[in-house]
Image (tube, rainbow, N blue to C red):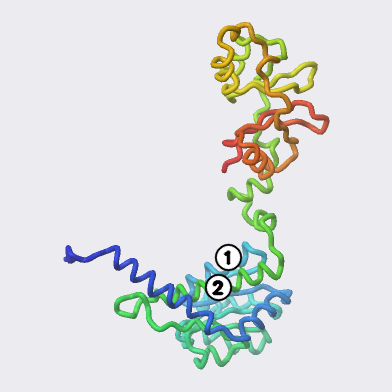
Amino acid sequence: MMDKNMNIENIAKEVFKIESKEIANLSSLLTDDFKNAIKSIYESNGKFIISGMGKSGIIGKKIAATLASTGTPSFFLHPAEAYHGDLGMIEKEDILLLISNSGETDEVLKLIPFLKSQGNITISMSGNPQSTLGTNTDYHLNIAIEREACPLNLAPTSSTTAALVMGDAIAVALMKLRDFKDENFAKFHPGGSLGRKLLTTVNFVMKKDNLPICDSESSIKDIINKITDGKCGLVIVVDNENIKGVITDGDIRRAMETKQDEFFSLEAKDIMSINPKLIKANEKLIQASEAMSEAKINSLIVVDESDKLTGIVQMYDLGV
């Protein structure tokens, strides 16, 4: 039965304290092996393959996923499955990262003879540089910790966090060497919000049918009806296919307050905002988002290359 006096919040804080201390200590364990390993991966024409058993394997899968999405061709290979037929997935140009906190995991060690015979560059990640794994690979990344966050000092907690952070360091170092930009990231994440903003153009999301349009001599009544029917919160003022201005529901409210006596005799040209913000239909959503944020508005008028009205794009269309 749980002790009612136990402070659950303090337990969480203690875990954070222990693991953050272990992470901070990693920088003191770095050697030239890290720099040389990164250089080898960067200059390689092959893939970067990660392997590990148990919790190390789970961390390895995450590291491989991070690398693959940030410009380094990478995948995870289960060591037991590799030893039972999947070694054929490893080509001579590939570099292997083998993860084992103890450095003595049998399934991982069994891969080394094959990798040595094929001439693969190998990198190990363990908490013991003098382990069998550490002394039989080309480069060793030390992830030694003083204690696990587990109160029994048994369950992999601090050690898996250290391995994960070391993997992130590898990925970020390679990103910087490759000058990997947000555009590159988006290409590997077309389904995410960033990919959507950076790769999708305005014409794919804009409203283009039944646009709320009036001319400069339209009455207040017609303008209000157009705004209501258009459901965009605005009406575009167009004369002879030329965009003259825009009227928002906010413009209507302000006109009611400042021009009460003449309000119902006003025409579109009397209250419209001239020089409305425009965007080309072939511009990216990220440019639309930036334009709206800069102007502090939530809608843009979309035009073609001849600046003719094509549609309306609004902030909620961007999926941000």
User: Are the two marked residues, 1 and 2, in contact with CB atoms closer than 8 angstroms?
Assistant: yes
- Which mark identifies residue 167? 2
Label 2 is placed on what type of residue?
Gly
Nearest to N terminus: mark 1 or mark 2? 1
| Mark number displayed over residue 2 | none
Q: What residue sits 59% from the left and 86% below the top?
A: 31
Give the residue at x 61% y 34%: 297
Residue 70 lies in quadrant:
bottom right
Q: Position of residue 116 (x, y in %)?
A: 64, 89
**Left or right of residue 126, residue 226 in this image:** right
Q: Is residue 267 visible?
A: yes
**Tag 1: amino acid:** Thr
**Mark 1 lies on residue:** 66
Q: Is residue 112 left or right of residue 57?
A: right
Q: Is residue 275 above or below residue 5?
A: above
Measured from the top left, where is residue 143 in percent x and y?
A: 49, 81
Residue drawn at the location 58% of the way across and 65% of the way down: 66
- Would residue 287 be found to the left or right of residue 52 on screen? right
Give the image location of residue 43, x and y in percent. Answer: 73, 76
